[in-house]
Image (tube, rainbow, N blue to C red):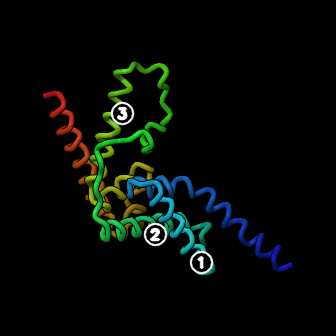
Amino acid sequence: MPQNADRSDRHPLDAWVLNTLPRAVRYAQSLLMNSSDADDLVHDCYCRLLQKSSRYDLARDGTKLLYRSITNACIDRARKVQRTVSIHRGDDDESTDHMMIDTKSETPAAIVARRELNDAIGLALAGLPVEQRAALELKSMGYSLAEIAQAIEVSESNAGVLVHRARRAVADQLKRAFDEESA
């Protein structure tokens, strides 16, 4: 009988994990630029949160705690490991081409242009400090500055500065990349 009680208690947590997992993994991938590292990191974050589920109301606050945990883990990892980014994309590498785009109606030139833009954006994002990349990613996911500030543990005004600087740096990098290309 106690096992059934445990299963019914865990059911909301299972639903929470299943509901938040895809976005959490994509968020970690955007910060780490590596899907296997992101999977491992998100798994570890879930494990830590679920171990403390008696202290937290994960149904209510779990998503905020999860994103904060992922952000902090990514920042810690970035401080420990110096990253290098390859400008060469192999056939087995993941890309941002998974977006819902009707490629049948695209011309070959449009496909190449889209890939070049995706690559340039990826390089620009990879060049950002993790805190700026996290703030920009959360903003693009629709989070408010207050929620971003809470997730990355900064003030709300600092979160706004991080988003602004990240946008500016990406725009400057894209401008430089495409100005060099057209020259």
Q: Quadrant of the N terminus?
A: bottom right
> Mark 3 and mark 2: span between their CA atoms?
32 Å
Local crowd at mark 2 within 10 Å, few (<14), some, or many (≥20)? many
Instruction: Give the numbered dot on residue 69.
Output: 2
Residue placed most toward the observer, 18 or 83: 83
89 sits to left or right of 183: right
Residue closest to the eye, 69 or 119: 119
Residue identified by numbered label 3: 115
Gap in angstroms between the C-alphas marked 2 and 1:
13 Å
Q: Residues within 10 Å of mark 1 (few under 14, many from 20)?
A: few
Observer-nearest residue: 4 or 110? Answer: 110
Look at 41% across and 54% down and name the residue there: 34
- Asked where in the image residue 154 lies, by quadrant, the reply is bottom left
State the SS at label 3. Answer: helix
The amino acid marked with disc number 3 is Arg
Give amino acid for label 1: Gln
Residue in the picture at 20% in, 38% down:
177
